[in-house]
Image (cartoon, grey):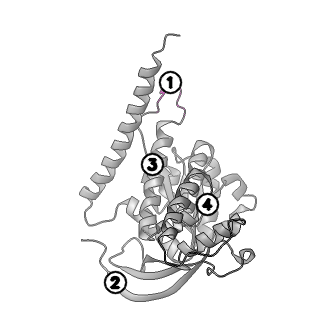
Amino acid sequence: MNLDIDSEAIRVLQETSQALQACAQRLQQARTHLPGQPSDFRRAVELLHQSVCQGGKVVITGVGKSGKIGQKLVATFLSVNILAMFLHPTEALHGDLGMVGPHDTVLALSYSGKTEELLAVVPFVRQRGAHLVGLGGEVNSPLGHAVDAWLDARVSSEATPEIPAPTVSTTVALAVGDALAVCLMQLCACTPQVFSSNHPGGALGRALQTVSCSKLATTSHPSPVSQADPLEHHRMVSSDIDPPLVKFTCKESQNNVSTLPSVTSVTSSLFLTPPDSPPNERPSQVFAYNKTCNQSFEAERT
C-alpha cells in the first residue's frame, strides 16, 4: 500500500480543525439569530450551574466512544472542583440509578441520539426530577427531543468516511464538553489554590507544589517542621498555603432557568481542615453550600 503518511496525518488534523471551527461558528450564529433568547449552550451551562448551587452534581453518561469522552469530562469537572460522576447506561438499569438525585443534571452523550441503552435510561432520569442535557450530532433524534438543552457537536464526516470510526466527532464532543467545564469553572470561581489541592501527584502536581513552596518561602512565618518527615512537611506546606476557607460565588436562577431575566447570587464555601489539625484528621475536601440567597439580582443579559 502506497501511503504518504505525513500528508494523511495533515489531512486528518486539518479536517478536525475545520470541524471545530464550524462548531464555534454555529454557536456564534445562534447568538446572532436569537439575540433575545439564550442559546442551548448557555441553557446547558445554566442547568449545570443550578445543580452545583443547589448542592447537586453533574452525571455524565454514554456508551462506546461517547462513554470514553464522558469519562474524560468527569475527570475535568472534578479537577476544577465540580462534583461529577460517570453513569454507564447499562449499569444504571441495574442499580446505579441510585446516584441520580433531583438536584442533578445528567449530560448524555450520543452522536446519533439513538443509542438504545442511553434512551432506556431517560425516563428514569426524568422520574427522579433531574435535568437532562444532550451532546451529539443529531438534534432531530429521540434523545434530542427528550432533553432540556442540546449541545450541537455535529460534523460533516469522520476522518475516514469509508470506515466511519468515531474520530472527528469525538474530538468535537470533547471540545464542547471542555468548553462547558471552563464556563462552569469560571461561574463557580474555582481558584488556583483549589485546583492545586486537587492535583497533589504527577508532573502537574509536582509543578504546582513547586510554585506553592516558592510562595511559602516568601512568608514571614515558616513552619518549624522536620525534613525527616516528608509527609508531615507536605501537610504543613499545603496548610500554610491553601487558606482554611476558600469562598466562591455561584449564581443560581431565581425560578425557571429557561427564562432567566435575572439571577440570584448564592454564596457557597469550600471548607478545608484548619492548619493545626493532626495528619490523621485531615479529610478530603468537604463542600458546604450556604443556601441563603442575598436577594440581590444582577442582569445577565443586555
Q: SS at mark 3?
A: helix
Q: Earlier in the sequence, mark 2 or mark 4?
A: 4
Q: Residues within 10 Å of mark 1 (few under 14, many from 20)?
A: few
Q: SS at mark 4?
A: loop
Q: Which mark is residue 200?
A: 4
Q: Are marks 2 and 1 in contact (CB under 8 Å)?
A: no
Viewer-nearest of discs 2 and 4 = 4
Q: Earlier in the sequence, mark 3 or mark 1?
A: 1
Q: Are marks 3 and 1 in contact (CB under 8 Å)?
A: no
- Type of residue at label 1? Glu
- On-image quarter of the C terminus: bottom left
Q: Is residue 117 above or below residue 251?
A: above
- Type of residue at label 2? Phe
Q: Residues within 10 Å of mark 3 (few under 14, many from 20)?
A: some
Q: Which mark is residue 175?
A: 3
Q: Nearer the viewer, residue 84 or 217?
A: 217
Residue 94 placement (x, y as % from top left): 75, 58
**Residue topped by disc 2:** 297
Q: Nearer the viewer, residue 110 or 229?
A: 229
Asked if residue 160 is among those painted magenta in the image, a careful observer would answer: yes
